[in-house]
Amino acid sequence: MRWRWNDRVGLASVSLALAAACVPGEVEPVPGQTQRVVLDGSRLAALSTASIDRVDLTISGPGMAAPVSAELGRTTGSAWTASVTSIPAGPARIFEALAFDASGTLLYQGQTVSDVLAGSTLQLVVILQDPPPPPAPGVPLVSSVEVSPGLVAPSSPVDLRVVAAGSSPSDLLSFAWGATCQNSTEQGTFLDGGGASTRWIAPDVQPLNCTLSVRVGGQQGSSVTVYVGVQVSS
């Protein structure tokens, strides 16, 4: 997921891969149950991992008494990984990875949101990128974009939801969804291209790498555009 503040690219890129089926939306928390999560913190080729001293993972969400924290360990490649087993089941768990240098300066970050179902295994891939600049006054704040699934068969649906807030409680937001599929003239179709929640029907061809976007606009004319990747393949 790429964040663009007023068409100035700030970065907090996230791709999401599910190792087990996970239904989006409201999930009833199950007391006493925990979720095993494997998080793979990777990077874009243009970024350097040589100066990264540590990568911290924090998981938070509604109904959790306190955030769950873990430190990721560097693998033999460019990835940083961790297995966490103390995450209560429930909806809208926020997974945030922060990469620091030896002096404690934040170098890269990434974030994604996913429901956590009791008894299932979820694999998250977070691509670390430069921290985004502070939003300009009046720019809507996008908390998350939910995509399910991230890998879809041709002509199959993908459910989408953006969570955003205006710069003031009275600010009315507008939404505009779009799609671009590499090396294809077919871009799929949105059932509702102007709502906070919608469904995208993938093209009937494969394999494709598609980028879905949502532009969130505020009443003062400022906007934020968020991008997320979806693969079309059976």
Image (cartoon, rainbow, N blue to C red):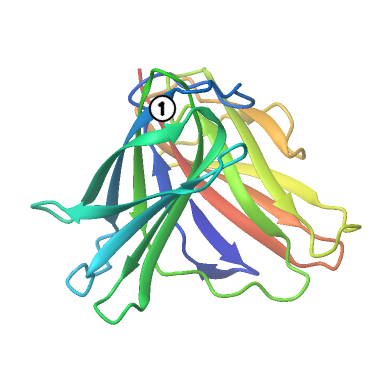
The one of 155 and 19 positioned closer to us in this rendering = 19
Taking the image as drawn, is residue 124 in sight? Answer: yes
Q: Please give the name of the residue rendered at 85% of the width and 68% of the height, measured from the top-left corner.
A: 220
Q: Position of residue 152 (x, y in %)?
A: 44, 23
| Residue lying furthest bottom | 103
Viewer-side residue, 138 vs 174: 138
* Residue at (68, 45) in percent of width and height: 163
Residue at image point 38% right, 32% down:
208
Q: Which residue is mark 1?
A: 34
Residue 201, image x and y in percent? 58, 24
Please tell me whether mark 1 sits on a helix, a strand or a loop.
strand
Is residue 187 something one can see in this rendering?
no
Residue 129's x, y, as percent?
A: 38, 63
Q: Position of residue 149 (x, y in %)?
A: 48, 26
The amino acid marked with disc number 1 is Thr
Viewer-side residue, 111 vs 150: 111
Local packing at callout 1 (Cα closer than 10 Å; few below 14, some 14-19, many 20+) is many
- Specify whether 128 is left or right of 49: right
In this rendering, is residue 109 above or below 27?
Answer: below
Q: Is residue 92 left or right of residue 138?
A: left
